[in-house]
């Protein structure tokens, strides 16, 4: 069964750092584009970052320079390192597998709350 | 403000059809055949319903269909059922820098 499980969400103070993990099963992350998508409370979906099979990475302007996506092939896991967190980063963060720029598999999401 | 424009709400009675629009630009919807639609029930993760403008993943009922004309894509739900009540989001590839952009979402109510 194809599955994604995110962990790492927490309540964190503004300016703090957090690392989210996304463990995949049923498929190989290195053979797929993998993205992070977030959803602020009561709001819509926002693409955050993608890790291409080539190793290239891209980020939304709202997180560029603060967030870093990475991949551990041995653990079949994708990560999102989030630094200099702001209140506006508060959201449920989803990990998603990309197939032709369509997200065909999603995790259950992990909540990040940035607040003092 | 979302990159793609969707109506905030739509509604229909059971058995009826409803169409949700998604308007972008030549840089996203109009420039690529990579429009997708997602269904999201409260508290749940989104589910892919349409990809590549009009293709349905395995397991998605054929009551769901997609199309595109110029810079506007559309999702049509035919034979509305109670379980179709959810939020629907469109998305489009927007080039290597912007990657994927989403619409603001449409809340579909089955009356």
Image: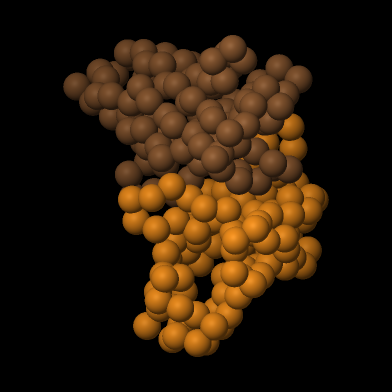
Chain colours: A brown, B orange
Left or right, A33 with reference to B12: right
Tell me if I can see residue A85 in this picture.
Answer: yes
Image point (25%, 18%), residue name: A13
Q: Position of residue A49 (x, y in %)?
A: 57, 28
Between A89 and A101, the one nearer to me in the picture: A101
In the rendered image, residue B62, in percent from the top left (x then y), is placed at: 64, 72
**Is residue A60 in sight in this rendering?**
no
Q: Is residue B89 above or below residue A24?
A: below
Q: Residue A37 vs residue B99: left or right?
A: left
* Vertical position of residue A110 compared to residue B8: above or below: above
Please state the horizontal and vertical placement of residue B41, each as a whole percent of the image: 39, 58
* Occupied quadrant, residue B75: bottom right
Residue at position x 44%, y 85% in the image: B14
Q: Quadrant of the C terminus of chain A?
A: top left
Foreground: A8 or A89? Answer: A8
Residue A46 falls left or right of residue A55: left
* Residue nearest the viewer, comparing B18 with A7: A7
Q: Which image quarter holds the N terminus of chain A?
A: top right
| Vertical order, A51 against B72 (above or below) | above
All told, the count of numbered labels is 0
Residue at (62, 51) in percent of width and height: B91
Image position, residue B94 (x, y; %): 71, 42
Taking the spot 73% from the left edge, 63% from the top edge, the residue there is B54
Return the residue nearer the eye: B40 or B1.
Answer: B40
Q: Residue lying farthest left?
A: A116
């Amino acid at each position: 069964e194809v599955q994604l499980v995110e962990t790492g969400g927490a309540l964190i103070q503004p300016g703090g750092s957090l690392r989210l993990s996304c463990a995949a099963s049923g498929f190989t992350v290195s053979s797929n584009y993998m993205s992070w998508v977030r959803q602020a409370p009561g709001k819509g979906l926002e693409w955050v970052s993608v890790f291409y099979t080539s190793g290239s990475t891209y980020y939304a302007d709202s997180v560029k320079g603060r967030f870093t996506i990475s991949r551990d092939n041995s653990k079949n896991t994708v990560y999102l390192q989030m630094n200099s967190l702001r209140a506006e980063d508060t959201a449920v963060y989803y990990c998603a597998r990309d197939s032709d720029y369509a997200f065909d598999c999603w995790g259950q999401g992990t909540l990040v709350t940035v607040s003092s | 403000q979302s990159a793609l424009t969707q109506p905030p709400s739509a509604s229909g009675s059971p058995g009826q059809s409803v169409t949700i629009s998604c308007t972008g630009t030549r840089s996203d919807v109009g420039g690529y055949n990579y429009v997708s639609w997602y269904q999201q029930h409260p508290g749940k993760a989104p589910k892919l319903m349409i990809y590549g403008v009009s293709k349905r993943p395995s397991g998605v009922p054929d009551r769901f269909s997609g199309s595109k004309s110029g810079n506007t894509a559309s999702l049509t739900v035919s034979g509305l059922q109670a379980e179709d009540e959810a939020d629907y989001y469109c998305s489009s590839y927007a080039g290597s820098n912007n990657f994927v952009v989403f619409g603001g979402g449409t809340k579909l109510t089955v009356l």
